[in-house]
Amino acid sequence: MDGLKYINKGRIHDDFDYCVYGFLKLIVNIGIKIKIRINTDKIEKQFYMRGAIMTDFIIDLMVTIWLTILIYLFLSELYFRTRGFKAIKREIEVYTKECNELNDHIEDMKSVDLGFRRSYNGEGKYSNPKINQKHLKYNPKVCNCSDYIFKNAKNKPFEYVYKYFNVKADEKTLNKLKNTLNDFLAVEEGKKLLERQRDEIIKKIRKELPYFIRRFTGIQRLSRKLGFKDIDLKDSYFPKLTFRYISNAGHKNEPYDFIFDIKHLNEFIEFLSKKIKFKKSVAGQRALMTPKLREKIKERDGYTCQICGLSNKDEPNLLLEIDHIIPLSKGGMTTEGNLQTLCWRCNRSKGAKI
């Protein structure tokens, strides 16, 4: 990024700004003209028209605002088609592509199905036929339950998720949860790094843009025009299981959503580890992939990818991930000796080969 240089040759920003100011000035001068129709000979009779005059003023003002917005949108779209803007896009194309690849990698890690399902064993029937039709269709991620189960699920969510969504207390399930937790931790870190990297790129080119583009164009619209994909900062990707209580007559319909966010995933892994009856075995003594352990491995490896040698000194916004040298699926353990720091590119490449 420090080596970015921008060529001003062939850009028409000054002329473009001049045209913009000319258009806006013309529109404003037309829009703010207020037609005052007061006959000085009959001024007493026209006091009642003040309300109408004020209405005309408000209408003129609204028309002026909308015309200004439309003119801005038209002129901005016109600018985004100019050679000058296309030259800027070409200059940062390498960085845009890199950000978009990281964005795709983050989105891929969000696509997780824990495999927990509510088995269909014939839900009960309600006296209200509309409830049966609307709510009793089988949904593997929803447990329609009694008031007793509903209240207990809110107080002891791990126990009831384990019991009613057929969670298996075995190594395979535990490995799945640990891998998911590792991915989610990388996603949350990656989103922040990606947003910061995009904003730094845009900040460096912002001074090359016309004033009215810098002043009135939001970061999201500008980033799209530069070729960046939208960054989804929401946490709605976390898996969700639902307990729902519906009273017999249908007057009460209350859902409780248990969301497997990072905190709950950590706690559920601990809960499931205790359920597995091999604590004395090597598998039962595995460490949890906690944020503290991730940071410890990164610090041990000098925040450097152990395959390509790239570090956050080379790329301050580099996403570093923690990788199992021997995968969990092949008997590897979540211990310091089996963990290494990889950049997201090398980790993705390694995962594709396994």
Image: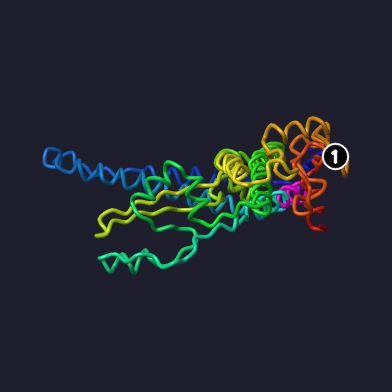
Foreground residue among 347 and 96: 347
Q: Residue at x 70, y 39 (%)?
A: 197
In the picture, the quarter occupied by the N terminus is: top right
Task: Tell whether 344 sits left or right of 227.
Answer: right
Which residue carries the number 1 mark?
A: 310
Most extreme residue toward the left is: 45
Task: Tell whether 334 sits left or right of 68.
Answer: right
Which residues are the magenta region?
87-101
Query: Residue flagged by tag 1: what amino acid is it?
Result: Leu
Q: How many marks?
A: 1
| Magenta residues, dominant SS class | helix
Q: How is the image coloured?
A: rainbow
Crowding near the residue tagged with mark 1, few <14, some 14–19, many ≥20 C-alpha atoms within 10 Å: some
Residue 220 x %, y %: 58, 46
Residue 164 x %, y %: 48, 55
* Residue 31 vertical position relative to residue 146 in the rendered view, above or below: above
Task: Find numbered disc 1 in the image and state the secondary structure of the residue it sits on.
Answer: loop
Q: Is residue 246 magenta?
A: no
The answer to whether residue 213 is visible is: no
Residue 97 x %, y %: 75, 51
Q: Residue at x 43, y 47 (%)?
A: 153
Q: Can you tell which quarter of the image residue 116 is in?
A: bottom right
In the picture, the quarter occupied by the C terminus is: bottom right
Foreground residue among 124 and 303: 124
Residue 310 x %, y %: 85, 39
